[in-house]
Image: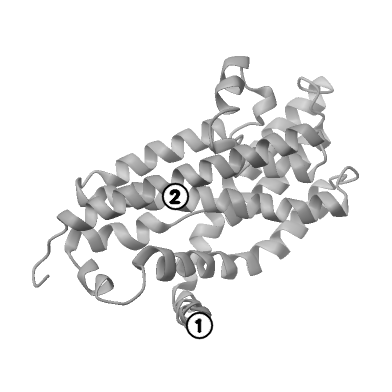
Amino acid sequence: MLNIYRRLWQTNWAEQWQYRANLLMYLLYWLVSPVVYLAVWTTVANAQGSVQGYTANDFVTYYLLLLMVDQLNADITIHLLAYKIQDGTLSGELLKPIHPILTNTLVNNLAFKALPLMVMIPVWLLLCLLFRPDFGTVTLPNLLLGIPAIILGFGINFLFGAAITCLAFWTTRVYAISEFYYALTVLFAGQFVPLDLMPPLVQQIAAYLPFQILRFFPIQFILGRLTGGEILVNFLLGFFWLLVALGLFQLVWKQGVKRFSAVGA
């Protein structure tokens, strides 16, 4: 199985280099929103001294980490597979002795992250020189333990994205559903603004949803802003939603494949 993943990685990595302009556009897309939010909130914090306890440096460190976490947790399954379901070319994938999503699509997601990350790191360092953040609260243990937190977030996002993509077996409006899911992520993951600054009701709802595990939890964890109890609760919540996402994906996939039909299938 490892040989299969290695071969898929080699293929997908080579494929990514064929779409360098496309990757550059995605990189600009990842950069724009966090940098705009950073500029706006630091300006407000500098003018007022702080915003509900968040200083200008707090906003800088938060949004700079969001740049990296957002890219590492991103999922593009719907762009890789939905059209294959809709035009019937998924038939060729189903003939292979590997799962179309848990192998090739998963590796394609990872390869898609790797190349922009090579460009993102120097850009991120340049932004650090411009905004001069103080990462004094970041410790090596938090940084290292933040890696499994980010991986957990990606797993949840990937499986939910795969489940939504499989809705293409029933509807051609799957992209609209995906956009709605993304809107929920922006609202409840702390992507638009740190969840600490959202209304109490939104914070209470977000505390039980999977979205904050994708962005807010890893960022706050790395920045050392969580207690040991909060870290444990969030990891348990993350594993719960990972199992929910896996179960939902398997259910939708199996039922969708049963009703799938295509010319020549």
Q: Nearer the viewer, residue 132 or 58?
A: 58
Q: Nearer the viewer, residue 11 or 52?
A: 11
26 over 49 or under it: above or below: below
Q: Position of residue 37 (x, y in %)?
A: 64, 37
Q: Position of residue 237 (x, y in %)?
A: 60, 37
Q: Please tell me in which quadrant of the rendered image residue 53 appears.
A: top right
Q: Residue at coordinates 78% horizontally, 43% vertically from top-left? A: 61
SS at mark 2 in the image: helix
Residue to which mark 2 is pinned: 246
User: Mark 1: few, some, or many residues within 10 Å (few <14, many ≥20)?
Assistant: few
**Quarter of the figure with the C terminus:** bottom left
Alpha-carbon distance for marks 1 and 2?
26 Å
In the figure, is residue 104 to the left or right of 186? left
Lower sequence index among marks 1 and 2:
1
Q: Position of residue 97 (x, y in %)?
A: 32, 77
Q: Please tell me in which quadrant of the rendered image residue 36 appears.
A: top right
